[in-house]
Image (cartoon, helix red, strand yellow):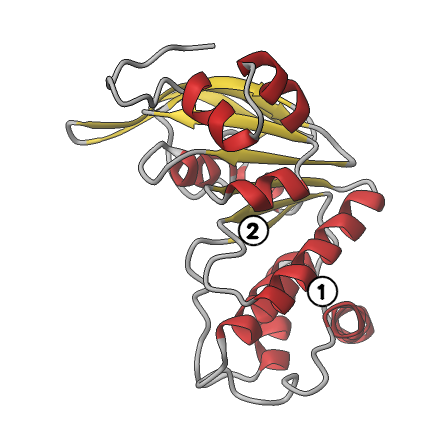
Amino acid sequence: MIIVKDVAKAYGDVQAVKSVSFHADDAKITTLLGANGSGKTTTLRAISGLLHMDAGSVTVDGMIVADDPVKAQASLGVFPDSFGLYTRLTTREHLAYFGEFHGLSGTKLDAAITEVDKMLNLSEILDRRTEGFSQGQRMKVALARAILHRPSNIVLDEPTRGLDVMNIRLLRTILFDLRKEGRCVLLSSHVMAEVSALSDHVVMMAEGVVCAEGSPAELIARAGEVNLEEAFVKLTGQEDNGERKVA
């Protein structure tokens, strides 16, 4: 479980996140939904312990991230906004390298690689260098790297970006399987169809704050609209008049 309380972060004069609070529960898929620049990525980086917050706190499975980022990160699997693959390494070498960061070695590491190989069907690329990989293949390596150590919480930043239909379907199936296993899945997106299809709980963000949250159906009903896109426009105050309302 991930609990975010009053998190704020500025980059110079730009207040990327003003005061964000929400929680992502185990055995659920929670989505941060917002336009580019709404603060989603900054919030996920704070959760992952990758940046120092100006205010607020993040708790992962009862651990305060700022107090012991390394320990908290052991319970997190992070799928970043940039895959960050080393092109000279094979997929297997990537997994071994990151697995060792999480204390895996020997037969435990081999077993973990075998498990993600089966889950993601990596056999054709397992011993190939990642240079020249398609976007879908790169996604598989990045996701395998994130879940290799079987973390209880999975954090994904815009995971469907650049993927074709079949790879989006594969990713969706994997996320549903992780939820079924009782994992906490937290992702960001601005693609309404994907958010509607994936999410148990949606946290709508705009201009660095949370505007509304609930299930897709609850948010649509609250806004009195016919779909999530129209509900998002109303609840985040993104109407043409430029006024912003907090729900």
Number of the label disc, if any, that sits on residue 20? none
Mark with earlier residue (1, 2): 2
- Dot 2: few (<14), some (14–19), or many (≥20) neighbours within 10 Å? many
Q: Residue at x 55, y 20 (%)?
A: 225
- Dot 1: few (<14), some (14–19), or many (≥20) neighbours within 10 Å? some
Instruction: State the residue in front, 123 or 49.
Output: 123
| Residue 199: image location, x then y, percent | 66, 37
- Judging by the rendered image, the residue that carries numbered circle 2 is 78
| Residue 34: image location, x then y, percent | 43, 34
| Residue 15: image location, x then y, percent | 25, 25
| Residue 209: image location, x then y, percent | 39, 20
Q: Is residue 106 left or right of residue 70?
A: right
Q: Is residue 184 left or right of residue 3?
A: right
Q: Nearer the viewer, mark 1 or mark 2?
A: 2
Q: Is residue 179 left or right of residue 147?
A: right
Instruction: State the residue in front, 72 or 170.
Output: 170
Q: Residue at x 46, y 41 (%)?
A: 190
Give the quadrant of residue 38.
Answer: top left
Q: Residue at x 59, y 79 (%)?
A: 91
Q: Residue furthest left?
A: 13
Which amino acid type is shown beneath numbered disc 1? Leu
Instruction: State the residue in front, 242 or 63.
Output: 242
Give the quadrant of residue 17.
Answer: top left
Which amino acid type is shown beneath numbered disc 2? Val
- Asked if residue 164 shows in the view, the reply is yes
- Measured along the vertical axis of the image, is residue 244 above or below residue 233? above
Question: In 3D space, how far apart are the residues under numbered discs 1 and 2 (Cα atoms)?
Answer: 17 Å
- Judging by the rendered image, the residue that carries numbered circle 1 is 104
